[in-house]
Amino acid sequence: MARIIRAVDIDAVLEPYPPSEWTDEGWLPGWRTAQAGRRQVNVFHDGPGEAAGLERYRLELQAAGYHVVADQQPGGGRRRLHITRP
């Protein structure tokens, strides 16, 4: 059974990488987390380099002991990572 996970826990692991930030010209590349219930956090990469960014985050999170599944939002939407605790 999956255990409770919080977005702030994932933020701490991804802290060495720059978080995304919205400016008047668009997104500055970086990560963003979103709580998806009590047992899942989603990680997105905003700005250019989405595939490479998500791969870096996947490797970092797996090394920290999290279970990571790459996914895409329904209807051909944004790519993301589903993060849970094993």
Image (cartoon, rainbow, N blue to C red):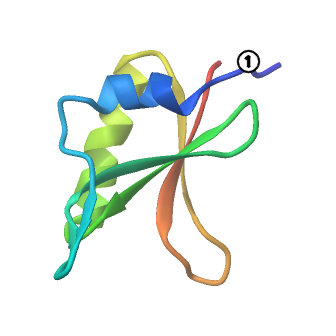
What's the residue at 73%, 30% (across, down)? 39
In the image, 29: left or right of 8? left
Q: Position of residue 8 (x, y in %)?
A: 48, 27
- Residue at the outermost front position: 24
Task: Give 83 or 12, whichever is nearer the viewer.
Answer: 12
What's the residue at 25%, 59% (across, down)? 21
Q: Position of residue 23 (x, y in %)?
A: 20, 72
Above or below for 53 versus 59: below
Res. 47 image quadrant: bottom left
Q: Position of residue 16 (x, y in %)?
A: 18, 29
Instruction: Please rate how many residues cluster around mark 1, counting C-alpha atoms within 10 Å: few if below 14, some from 14 to 19, many from 20.
Output: few
What's the residue at 35%, 23% (across, down)? 12
Res. 3 image quadrant: top right
Q: Which residue is mark 1?
A: 3
Above or below for 17 versus 62: below
In the image, 20: left or right of 44? left
Above or below for 71 versus 40: below
Callout count: 1
Q: Secondary structure at mark 1?
A: loop
Q: Amino acid at mark 1?
A: Arg
Quadrant containing the C terminus in the rendered view:
top right
In the image, 83: left or right of 32? right
Quadrant containing the N terminus in the rendered view:
top right
What's the residue at 65%, 83% (across, down)? 75
Q: Position of residue 64 (x, y in %)?
A: 39, 17
